[in-house]
Image: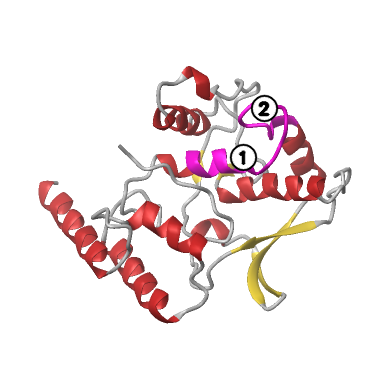
Amino acid sequence: MKKLLTFLASACLAASAVPFSTFAVEYEKYPNRADFDTNDEYYQELSDGIKDGRYFADFDGNGKFDLIDANVIMHYYAMIMTDDIPTDWEGKSTFFSYSKDCRYSFLKDYDLVERDGMLDYYITLNNDMLENVKKYGDINGDGVINTDDANEFGIAYRQGFELGDVDFDGSVDASDASYVLEYYSSSQVSSEITEAIRIDMIDIADMNGDSVVDAVDASLILKAYAESSTSK
């Protein structure tokens, strides 16, 4: 059974946005976790409902569902926690933090800036985003909008991807193995590989289940790729 994958804003281990239907006029209420026997079933339903347009997911209004949408929810919660009740987001901004090696497509529309000695992606906010969060941001239906809701979205985003598909492009192939090797090399020498990133990588790239992501996992990804290529 697929591992549950936790959304960690400091990690940048996701890529191609999941497109979803934008023609739906009315959205269904998000699924209730209590109605499902397992967490996997719940997150699969949430993911499927987002993809086919039954559940609202486009918080930043760019026509697709990705981790920026979860980031917008987190920004709203951060403002609430500082007693800054959001009333106007026009011209405001937030940041998507990441490992400097991140090169994934869903971030291509955002500007890279240096902030407090770190490189982050700069996301311009507006009042449509604010209204989206207020209206649809309570993903888990507990009456509050917080990091739990962003986490629900992060897990749903990744639920449809296969273990080993590190760049989230829908296939396990040589590029995933290459990324794992780069990560493993960096993890031996770089302080930028945080505990959050390490845990996240284990969730998506630990092919042999030993709680370490290394060259062995890269080899297993290449093996899986070779086997899938042969079977086609």
- Tell me the number on the disc at residue 214: none
Look at the image and tell me whether residue 60 can be seen: no
Q: In terms of secondary structure, where does tag 1 sit? A: helix
Q: Position of residue 86 (x, y in %)?
A: 85, 44
Colour scheme employed for the rendering of this structure:
secondary structure
Q: 8 left or right of 131?
A: left
Quarter of the figure with the N terminus: top left
The spot of residue 30 in percent (x, y) is 58, 25
How would you rate the neighbour count of disc 2 (Cα within 10 Å): few for under 14, some for 14-19, many for 20 or more? few
* Extent of the magenta region: 135-156
- Kindly identify which numbered label has been placed on residue 148: 1
Asked if the magenta segment contains residue 60, the reply would be no
Q: Residue at x 72, y 33 (%)?
A: 144
Image position of 6 with respect to 45: above or below: below
Q: Determine whether, in the image, residue 45 is placed left or right of residue 141.
A: left
14 w.r.t. 183: above or below? above
The x and y percentages for residue 96 are 64, 60
CB atoms at circles 2 and 1 under 8 Å apart?
A: yes
Q: Amino acid at mark 1?
A: Asp
The amino acid pointed to by label 2 is Asp
Residue on which disc 2 sits: 142
Labels 2 and 1: the sequence-earlier one:
2
Q: Residue at x 74, y 43 (%)?
A: 129
Q: Residue furthest top?
A: 35
In the depicted structure, whether residue 211 falls above or below residue 7: below
Q: Is residue 145 visible?
A: yes
The quadrant where residue 115 appears: bottom right
Q: Is residue 192 above or below residue 163?
A: below
Estimate the x, y position of residue 177 in percent, counting from the top left.
28, 65
Report which quarter residue 54 is drawn in: top right
Identify the residue shown where x is 68% and y is 78%.
117
